[in-house]
Image (cartoon, rainbow, N blue to C red):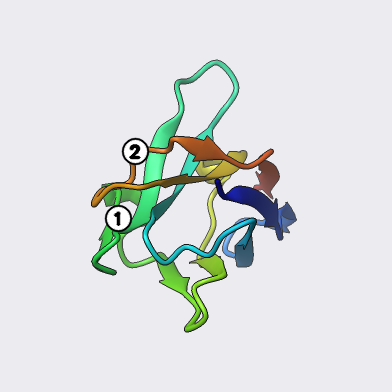
Amino acid sequence: EVQLVESGGGLVQAGGSLRLLCAASGSTFADYAVGWFRQAPGKKREGVACVTSDRETYYADFGKGRFTISIDNAGNTVSLQMNNLQPTDTAVYYCGASRSTLCLGHYWGQGTQVTVSS
């Protein structure tokens, strides 16, 4: 069973960038789909980006052109590069993994706070 640890959140001004990291322990991501999800106060958790078990990538519409998800060659770390951040991107960001083709989020990290000031 894989365990996930996120890092890289913080406070940034609008237009700034952050890079989130999701590190695997107990297993690699070799057989997993891994995605980033976010949850803003009072809102439901939503998908942000996904790298499938076939290593295809998908993005929510709000992230296209601004966010990039990638996985390292060793299959131990998934990153989310976020550029041109806006206050609407403020949320707790979670890494989720699943033994499936698509990102179903069966295993979760603890989350990392991203706050974008205007």
Three-letter amino acid code at the position of disc 2: Leu
Q: Is residue 115 left or right of residue 68?
A: right
Q: Residue furthest top?
A: 42
Q: Measuring from the top left, give residue 50's x and y in whole percent.
A: 35, 55
Can residue 82 be seen here? The reply is no
Q: Which residue is mark 2?
A: 104
Q: Quadrant of residue 18?
A: bottom right
Q: Residue at 37% of width from left, 60% of height from top?
A: 31
Q: In the visual, does 116 lie left or right of 85?
A: right
Question: What residue lies at 56% left-to-right and 38% top-to-bottom?
Answer: 108
117 vs 63: above or below: above
Question: Mark 1 — residue?
Answer: 59
Q: Does the image show residue 64?
A: yes
* Marks 1, 2: nearer the viewer: 2
Q: Secondary structure at mark 2?
A: loop
Q: Are marks 1 and 2 in contact (CB under 8 Å)?
A: no
Cα distance in 3D space between marks 1 and 2: 14 Å
Q: Who comes first in sequence, dot 1 or dot 2?
A: 1
Q: Judge from the rendering whether residue 42 lies leftward or rightward of residue 49; answer left or right.
A: right
Residue 110, image x and y in percent?
69, 38
User: Looking at the image, is 55 positioned above or below residue 59?
Assistant: below
Q: Secondary structure at mark 1?
A: strand
Report the front residue among 97 and 47.
97
Find residue 8 and report its horizontal and vertical position in percent: 71, 60
Residue 22 percent location from the top left of the image = 60, 59
Please give the label number shown on residue 38. none
How many discs appear?
2
